[in-house]
Image (cartoon, rainbow, N blue to C red):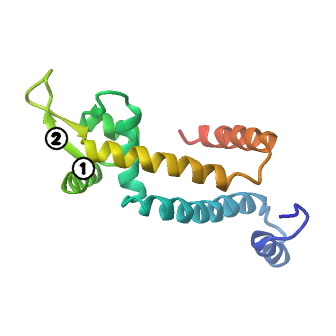
Amino acid sequence: MDEDKQDHVDRILAQWRRERPDLDVEPMGILGRLKRLGTHLGREVEAVLLKHGLSTSSFDVLATLRRSGAPHRLSPGELLEMTMVSSGTMTNRIDQLEKAGFVERIVNPDDRRSVLIALTDKGFATVEEAVGAHVANQQRLTRNLTAEDKAAFDRLLKKFLSDFE
């Protein structure tokens, strides 16, 4: 898109500036664009993952197990920490993934009172294929940005995110 061309958010901002000239609506533009971008990107990511029988939440768990390295198993607490969801949500995700045959609960060999969540062969194969498609999709979604744009955008997003994390 031509940087000088007005978008949907510009039209909303113009309306607010007309109706409430006393308000500084610049942050509304930034946050509005981030929200719209998140919606568009979420749809694109979900479409690719669905082709592999996964939702974004199930992919999140499988990818966390995969990137943890061999033997691709973590405690429920470690999964919680790495995915930032509630314990009830995580339990539900694990239950669904276990029913689908992607993960299994195994007794922790270091502490028989606890369990580890492990990728099954099916889960490993599925996430291997899905992560390749996911990364290719991310490349496609960012292809209109130059390397410099990507670096600047990443730097600014990291700076903004640091206020919240």
Identity of the residue drawn at 38% across and 31% down? 68
Which residue bears the numbered disc 2? 105
| Residue farthest toward the right in the current orientation of the protein | 4
- Tell me whether circle 1 and circle 2 mark residues in contact (CB < 8 Å): yes
Asked which quadrant contains residue 44, the reply is bottom right
Vertical arrangement, residue 165 with respect to residue 17, above or below: above
Q: Counting other residues with Cα less than 10 Å from the Cα at mark 1, is it few (<14), some (14-19), or many (20 or more)?
A: many
Identity of the residue drawn at 24% across and 34% down? 75
| Residue farthest toward the top in the current orientation of the protein | 110
Q: Choose between 120 and 58: the one closer to the eye.
A: 120
Vertical arrangement, residue 111 with respect to residue 161, above or below: above
Asked which quadrant contains residue 43, the reply is bottom right
Q: Give the residue type at disc 1.
A: Ile
Residue 8 visible in the current orientation? yes
Identity of the residue drawn at 50% across and 60% down? 48
Real-space CA distance between mark 1 and mark 2, rounded to the nearest whole angstrom:
9 Å
Residue 84 visible in the current orientation? no
Q: Give the residue type at disc 2.
A: Arg
Vertical arrangement, residue 154 with respect to residue 18, above or below: above
| Residue farthest toward the left in the current orientation of the protein | 112
Locate residue 5 relative to residue 138 in the image: left or right: right
Identity of the residue drawn at 67% across and 43% down? 157
Which residue bears the numbered disc 1? 94
Vertical arrangement, residue 79 with respect to residue 87, above or below: above
Identify the disc placed on residue 39: none
Which quadrant is the N terminus positioned in? bottom right
Q: Counting other residues with Cα less than 10 Å from the Cα at mark 2, is it few (<14), some (14-19), or many (20 or more)?
A: some
Q: Choose between 41 and 90: the one closer to the eye.
A: 41
Q: Position of residue 76 (x, y in %)?
A: 25, 38
Callout 2: helix, strand or loop? Answer: strand
Q: Where is residue 65 in the image (x, y as percent from the top left)?
A: 34, 37
Locate residue 114 relative to residue 35 in the image: left or right: left
